[in-house]
Amino acid sequence: MVEKKERISSYRMRSDKARTKTCLLALNDFEYDSRLRRVAASLASWGYEVVVLAEKSESTSDSETWQGVQIKRLKTTQRFWRKRRFLGFWLRAFIRAYKEKAQVYHAFDLDTLLPAALAAKLRRAKLIYETHELYLELEALRHRPVVRAVWSILEKSLIARADSIISVNESIAEIYQRRYRIKKPEVILSCPPLKEYPKRDLLRKQLEIPSDKKIILYQGVLRTGQGLFLLLELVEHLPEASLVFIGDGPLKKDLQVEVEKRELWGRVFFKNRLPPKDLLYYTASGDLGMLLMESRAPNNFYALPNKVFEYMMAGVPQVVSNFPELKNFVEGTKIGVTVDVNNLEETIATVREILFDEGELNQLRENCKRIAGDFNWENESEKLKKIYENLRL
């Protein structure tokens, strides 16, 4: 009898959640945003009705359903709006979000907070603000004081309206707490789901990398501040290794020109960005993951990007910049080492030492597998579940 009551209670809880609609807003096309996809899928699996308002790209459909999540993409690339991307998205996103009649509006980063906050206010709904960056400290805003001031006013005026705020690491959460005198945001790390990835030679076979070359790997957007040209200098001094870039971005052509200039073809390889479901199988093909992030802006200095957790989950040791969050996680868990990116000789020596010391490399790999049991989406998503449960809808 007790068991029957528990089943009925569990059904009612799920039924209540099924009536709770949450609208997620993100200024990307959803396809390659691993964190957004994890959040949306988790909410749907817990019984929430989930709608994602994303941006329409040339390669995506206007709408689709994925793992129980409704994805609706908004067109903002018409000629009139091309130079007004944010205004175009905000207008369409607000109208669409308001029509959704959701009980929760969940903004991913500052560039979607305005339409989410307006829809939540008019619908008397709950508002969640999830910030993955120190947006005001982005490298792109360093020399744009007027634009930065506008973003600052926007965030300051809207952040107090959020019923819950989520951040991606402790440093960013503490900065938000001090800057706006708010309760410290909940930290949810950008960890992939727990899964074992066998080490296969996918990259070596597809890119025809010689068997006697170790594979140094960088994955993610090819943009400034990531130390990508430093990686070319690094591999130039390590003839025993090859370098693979997985991803696309504004620096790709410049990198290819530099590879040509340095005569590194045959040692440096480019692979287009991969769907999240495939990426870590390729990551596991690497011997050493790299993130030589440059301190061009505070957002870089306090970053703890997805790739750090992806390298870990794929069992790939890593060498990263000696910035606070990177150092704390990578050295604290003993899954890699940190270096001073301004000291090229030290970086080359460190990479060479790890890459060609099989004992050290194997120990770091084992540490990755061990620590993945603690740092995974299954654990981190429990924090998200509690946030939604505490909204008291």
Image: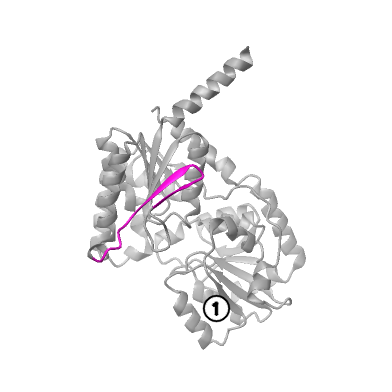
Secondary structure category for the residue under label 1: helix
How far across and how far down the image is residue 251, in percent? 44, 74
- What residue appears at the point 66 percent right and 55 percent down from the top-left corner? 334
Looking at the rendered structure, the kind of residue marked 1 is Leu
Which residues, given as a range, are shown in magenta? 63-79
How far across and how far down the image is residue 120, in percent? 30, 38
The quadrant of the image that shows the C terminus is top left
Which of 32 and 342 lies nearest the eye of the viewer? 32
- What residue appears at the point 27 percent right and 51 percent down from the top-left corner? 92
Residue 77 is covered by the magenta coloring: yes
The quadrant of the image that shows the N terminus is top right
Which of 193 and 379 lies nearest the eye of the viewer? 193
Q: Is residue 198 left or right of residue 124?
A: right
Which of 227 and 109 lies nearest the eye of the viewer? 109
Q: In the figure, 117 relative to 8: above or below?
A: below
Q: Is residue 327 visible?
A: no
Q: Residues within 10 Å of mark 1 (few under 14, many from 20)?
A: many
Q: Quadrant of residue 390?
A: top left
- What residue appears at the point 54 percent right and 63 percent down from the top-left corner? 274
Q: Is residue 260 left or right of residue 172?
A: right
